[in-house]
Amino acid sequence: MSLAIRLHIKHEEADFNSIVIPILREIQKYLNNQLIEIRKSQPLSEAIKQSYIDGILMKGQNLADKFPLFSFVSLSKDKQVPFKFPSKSYERERFLDNTGVGYASSSYRFIESIYNTIARTIITKKGSSLSALDFEALENKHLLVMTHKDWQNFTSSKDIDDYKDVKHHLVFSDEPLDAFYVYDTKESQTLVTLYNPEINQELTPLGENMGNAFEFEFIDKEGKVTVKVDAHIYC
């Protein structure tokens, strides 16, 4: 290739870079601005909000197995003071369709937090002193409920053969409670009440009733979505 041809090509490249590339940059800037405006005004996705709610409600999981003290509940149409959780704020894109970004559904441990609080209340108010615990008095239908710390403290001086067959369920606590509660799995017991806007009922399996006990509010403001959650679960 001759020198003249090479110089001509370079000149054309320079013309292209000086004219076309700035145009492409302006187009890209315009599209980015349009995308920002669309994301500011696009309605929040009902499907994504429902997926968020389902995550907190732990949909698809057997809650009665995971939280045995909630196996049976009573239902009430009367609201009491709910469990209130700190609000969580997200970028608005978290709840928009077609952003190209996926978000994992999560339970955020809401129900587990409530369960641990109520379980500790049941242990301390309806349970017995740890000094009265006799493994041999427990029957196959009994579920021993206590905190991790109390279990560790109590079993540390025992032979493993003394408790290897004991059905036990441990709940979280910052400090030991020095108490335990025996839950009779063969006797339907109601230890908690859930809010239900339609019915009063003294005894029912947990089933899908957890959904009615929660109230969700999605506040869409200034590019953020704040989620407020109240749980109407009463002990």
Image (cartoon, rainbow, N blue to C red):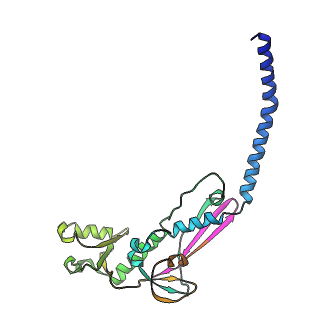
Q: Magenta stretch: residue 129 in it?
A: no
Residue visible at 53% across and 61% down in the picture: 105
Q: Position of residue 144 (x, y in %)?
A: 29, 76
Residue visible at 49% across and 89% down in the picture: 201
Instruction: Indicate the quadrant containing the N terminus: top left, top right, bottom left or bottom right.
Output: top right
123 w.r.t. 106: above or below: below
Instruction: Indicate the quadrant containing the C terminus: top left, top right, bottom left or bottom right.
Output: bottom left
Q: Which of 20 and 156 is in front in this view?
A: 20
Question: Looking at the image, which residue sits at the far front?
Answer: 1
The number of numbered discs placed on residues in the rendered structure image is 0
Residue visible at 66% across and 67% down in the picture: 219
Q: Where is residue 64 in the image (x, y as percent from the top left)?
A: 41, 75
Q: Where is residue 169 in the image (x, y as percent from the top left)?
A: 33, 72
Q: Quadrant of residue 204?
A: bottom left
Q: Nearer the viewer, residue 28 or 81?
A: 28
92 w.r.t. 168: above or below: above
Q: In which quarter of the image is residue 220?
A: bottom right
Residue visible at 54% across and 57% down in the picture: 104
Q: Tell me which segment is drawn in magenta.
A: 217-235
